[in-house]
Amino acid sequence: MEPLIAFAATTLVLRLLGRVKIDRFNAWRPALRGGLTALFLTTGVVHFVPEYRDSMIAMIPPGLPWPAALVAVTGVLELAGAVGLWVRPFKRAAAVCLTLLMLAMFPANVYASLNGIEFAGAPADPLGQRILIEVLWIGAAIAVATEPASTGRRARLDPIEAAAR
């Protein structure tokens, strides 16, 4: 639940700041980029916290090799993706790669949900809830990946922003 809270709270705070003060966040896609950054910094770091790491290793479906290495590699990729979302030449590629990473890790979440694997002592998310959360995050990453490149200050109206008006 903490990653969802980090994502939602950061996205909403940045969007509100965009409405009142900071032009950069006066559209949904940059605010979503901030939310995804908070999400992947949160989840990436916990890949290396022993209590959480052990739970993540238990989530890896049987038959996949080197569960501990997979957890470490996905943690590094999540952290790199979070940073990449803010490096102009890489932000689109980072969003696409994070989308693919979420899709690749989804079977572990399904396995944990269906098998009641606890995460650091908390019960696994119900499968329906987990699917909705993943759809939200993947949708946000796709929105960020398709963010128009700006050529100056608000050169083009963001299509998502235009639809929201």
Image (cartoon, rainbow, N blue to C red):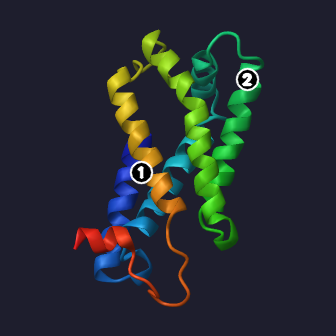
Which residue type carries mark 1?
Answer: Phe
Mark 2 / mark 1, whichever is N-terminal: 1
Local packing at callout 2 (Cα closer than 10 Å; few below 14, some 14-19, many 20+) is: some
Residue identifier under label 2: 68
Foreground of the two, 48 or 16? 16
**Displayed quadrant of residue 68:** top right
Q: CA distance from mark 2 to mark 1?
A: 26 Å
Q: Residue at x 27, y 69 (%)?
A: 163
Tell me where residue 8 appears, x and y as whole percent.
35, 52
Which residue type carries mark 2?
Answer: Ala
* SS class, disc 2: helix
* SS class, disc 1: helix
Local packing at callout 1 (Cα closer than 10 Å; few below 14, some 14-19, many 20+) is: many
* Above/below status of 94 relative to 152: above
- Furthest toward the left, the residue is 165
Tell me where residue 82 appears, x and y as whole percent.
60, 55
Look at the numbered discs 2 and 1 and tell me whether their residues touch, using CB distance below 8 Å: no
Q: Residue at x 64, y 20 (%)?
A: 57
Q: Which quadrant would the C terminus be assigned to in this image?
A: bottom left
Residue 7's label in the rendered image is 1
Q: Residue at x 69, y 45 (%)?
A: 77
Whether residue 62 sits left or right of residue 20 in the image: it is right
The tally of labels here is 2
Tell me where residue 43 appears, x and y as whole percent.
55, 41
Q: Residue at x 68, y 65 (%)?
A: 90
